Amino acid sequence: MVWKKGRGKLGAFAPLLGTWSAEAESQQGPVRCQRTFSKVLNDSHIYLRAVWQISEFTYEEQAFFGVDRAGITRFWSFTSDGKQSQGQLADVTDLHPQALGFEAQMPAGLARHAYWPDEQDGFYWVVESHSKKGWQRFSEHHYQRIS
């Protein structure tokens, strides 16, 4: 995959723009997730709409990525179960040299999510929590572009 960043602080999202799909296994059974990244608000923010289908259950996330007044790249996330989170850009190059990731302080502690290219035409996405033993992965998806 060509993982070429664009210009500006949100240029790192350029390879993610578009609609992507993944299928994975979870404790609740098979999961299908579709993520759509698009530029919004006169290209000042990136909008993410993620929809998970887990058996008969649908879970949705809407998030915005942008630069705050202090010049820090941040995200603001809202989910269909009423939860909210926010965090900031983080160094996640321990996962992959080209990884794009964010950290957030959650009620259970520090968490991060990250994206990085695969060897073909998709990307990986993970969510991890931090413990005394380091980062513990609890979700991983491999996304392919939807034409």
Image (spheres, rainbow, N blue to C red):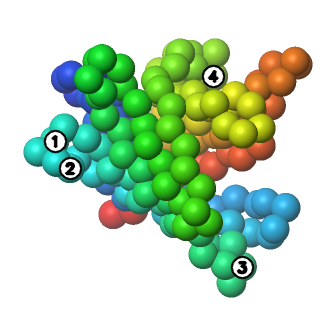
Circle 3 sits on which residue? 55
At label 1, the amino acid type is Asp
The quadrant in which residue 58 appears is bottom right
Q: Is residue 82 left or right of residue 75?
A: right
Q: Earlier in the sequence, mark 3 or mark 4?
A: 3
Q: Residues within 10 Å of mark 2 (few under 14, many from 20)?
A: few
> Do the numbered discs 1 and 2 sit on residues whose CB atoms are within 8 Å?
yes
For residue 97, above or below residue 25: above
Under tag 3, what secondary structure? Answer: loop
* Residue mark closest to the camera, 4 vs 1: 1
Circle 4 sits on which residue? 95
Under tag 1, what secondary structure? Answer: loop
Q: Residues within 10 Å of mark 3 (few under 14, many from 20)?
A: few
* Residue mark closest to the camera, 3 vs 2: 2
> Do the numbered discs 3 and 4 sit on residues whose CB atoms are within 8 Å?
no
At label 2, the amino acid type is Val
Alpha carbon of mark 3 to alpha carbon of mark 2: how far?
A: 31 Å
At label 3, the amino acid type is Ser
Q: Residue furthest left?
A: 42
Alpha carbon of mark 3 to alpha carbon of mark 1: how far?
A: 35 Å
Circle 1 sits on which residue? 43
